[in-house]
Image: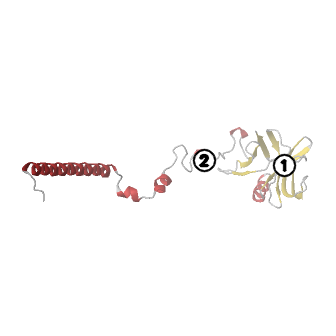
Amino acid sequence: MHVRTKGEAQVARSSTGFVAGLTAAALAVVGFLAYQASASAPPAAQLAAPTGKASASAKPSNLPPAGSPATKPDLSVPANSGTGVRVVYSLGAKRVWLAGVTKTPRTFAVMPSAISPKPGTYIVTSRTGHTTGSDGVAIEHVVVFTTAQNVVVGFSAAVDDSMASPTTAKKTGGIRMKRADGDAMWAFATHNSKVVVVP
């Protein structure tokens, strides 16, 4: 049996105190680091929110708002088409306006003919209720206003309501439109009505 001397007891007590001090210091450091981590973490509400919500609500800043002029085509009557009651046909826009009667003229898209008329002012020279086009398609409400390259040029609507692109192998002069638009053209463009073709 070993009996500690007075010196051994003092060493043992000082070692125990030293270890206890180190443990307390280590716990203090861990506690401080834990506090820093919790202070820099995002709020619990942010962690619970779906990640896609923020990106879905964000809108690109370079896009114009819906309904702004940048998203709508300009459907006003071309400024270089003159005045008065007239049919205006824009070759570039592939569009027709029945202008000069109402404040807001009727406008609609058309399928250009294989042979296009030159820009200028014309008058309606003939009208035919129903016939067969030079492309073999049954057409109605034919409104003729000029000739180009010895081909008769005018507006018409296919009975089957199609607006197919003309066959390039055939020299056709039919500017096609939907049947409802053909009805409006037929009522508007009577004999000697003015037709203005713009680029």
Give the x, y percent position of residue 17: 15, 50
Is residue 22 or residue 31 the one in the foreground? 22
Residue 180: quadrant of the picture: bottom right
Q: Identify the residue position indicated by label 2 in the image.
A: 71
Is residue 4 or residue 83 the one in the foreground? 4
Left or right: residue 97 compared with residue 140? left
Q: CA distance from mark 1 to mark 2?
A: 32 Å
Q: Are marks 1 and 2 in contact (CB under 8 Å)?
A: no
Q: Residues within 10 Å of mark 1 (few under 14, many from 20)?
A: many
Give the x, y percent position of residue 66: 56, 50
Q: Residue at x 39, y 57 (%)?
A: 47
Q: Secondary structure at mark 2?
A: helix
Q: Amino acid at mark 1?
A: Gly
Q: Residue at x 51, y 44 (%)?
A: 61
Q: Amino acid at mark 2?
A: Thr
Left or right: residue 114 compared with residue 60? right
How many circles with numbers are drawn on the protein? 2
Q: Residue furthest front?
A: 1
Please give the label number shown on residue 154. Answer: 1
Q: Residues within 10 Å of mark 2 (few under 14, many from 20)?
A: few
Q: Residue furthest left?
A: 6
Residue mark closest to the camera, 1 vs 2: 2
Q: Earlier in the sequence, mark 1 or mark 2?
A: 2
Task: Pick the quarter of the image with the C terminus.
Answer: top right
Q: Residue at x 18, y 52 (%)?
A: 20
Is residue 103 or residue 80 the one in the foreground? 80
Q: Secondary structure at mark 1?
A: strand
Give the x, y percent position of residue 175: 82, 49
Left or right: residue 139 compared with residue 35? right
Task: Pick the quarter of the image with the N terminus.
Answer: bottom left
In the picture shown, does residue 2 fall above or below 72? below
Residue 81: quadrant of the picture: top right
